[in-house]
Amino acid sequence: MYPVATPIGNLRDITLRALDVLAAADLIVCEDTRITRKLLTRYGITTKTVPYNDHNAQRVLPNLIRRLNDGDSLALVSDAGTPLISDPGFKLVEAAVSENIPVYPIPGANAAIAGLVASGLPTDSFFFAGFLPPKQGARRTRLEELARIPGSLVFYESSGRLAASLSDMRDVLGARKAVVAREITKLHEEAIRGTLVHLAEIYEEQGGPRGEIVIVVGPPGAEIVSDETVEQAIRDALQTMSVRDAASEVAAQTGRARREIYTMALAISGADSQS
Ligand code: SAM
């Protein structure tokens, strides 16, 4: 069984091995056979296809597992990108694994990874959060759960819900750096960067842009904090700490550079001792 990644826009983003596997498989299991057929036609692949989605999964799954057990090779694809990632396929792979059928992933395009690597936000540790719940209460609860994760957060979002999601992210996650990456690998590809405060404001005013969207949010601790808030934090810290320790503490709290905070702390402590 071969879960095969397909393009997320540009039809050339498919690996040579993916084309080999799709051509050689006995059957291609597709989220939507009409969409996959366009890709197959482009590459002259004539393998038979069957639909597999959330609606028919229970009905068709036993037959697919039987075919795998009989020795057929099945390729699994979704409409775009990597199957199983916010796309159908999990139950099929789970069932294959439980039957000891070997599963060979054919890696390739994935919007979350593409958005993350272009974001300019930390990539050493990140959490893929998929789609947020559509209802505001559940969405905020989910964001509160995600708020303490020590890494970048990667979301999928629809154009219609972008503004509402960004304003909830601003309220729950604060002024973190973030990126709205849109139409990756397509004609109108763009990345809009700013803080969650700026991005929420932009899309609250103009509504969601058309097309497909990945939102990447920087880790906690990198919030963009106003100068007034930083100065107040330094004053508070100086009540009980040396300039050096206060600078380290406030730099850690605000995500600002320690050298910058140290200079501010020196100035504040000098001014306070003169008054
Ligand atoms: N399995 C896919 C993958 O590997 O990326 C994701 C499928 S999910 C149903 C579709 C969502 O992925 C879209 O709503 C959007 O959030 C994101 N997406 C897919 N293609 C994209 C693209 N070209 N640019 C930006 N986001 C994209």
Image: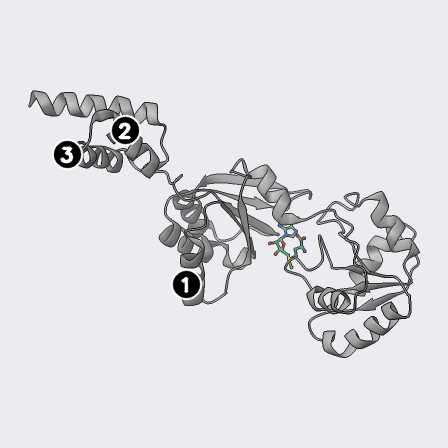
Q: Nearer the viewer, mark 3 or mark 1?
A: 3
Q: In this figure, which residue is indicated by the disc labeled 2? A: 247
Q: Position of residue 10 (x, y in %)?
A: 74, 45
Callouts 3 and 1 close, C-beta under 8 Å: no
What mark, if any, has residue 239 been given in the picture?
3
The front one of 81 and 89 is: 89
Q: Is residue 68 left or right of residue 192?
A: right
Does 270 sit above or below residue 110? above
N-term-proximal mark, 2 vs 3: 3
The amino acid type found where label 3 is placed reads Gln
- Indicate how the structure is coloured in the image: one colour
Instruction: Measure the alpha-carbon separation of dots 3 and 1.
Output: 36 Å
Q: Residue at x 26, y 29 (%)?
A: 245
Q: In this figure, which residue is indicated by the disc labeled 1? A: 141
Q: Position of residue 43 (x, y in %)?
A: 89, 49
Q: Position of residue 39 (x, y in %)?
A: 83, 53
The amino acid type found where label 2 is placed reads Ala
Q: Position of residue 125 (x, y in %)?
A: 53, 43
User: Neighbour class for label 2 at 10 Å: few (<14), some, many (≥20)?
Assistant: many
Q: Secondary structure at mark 2?
A: helix
Instruction: Measure the alpha-carbon separation of dots 1 and 2.
Output: 34 Å
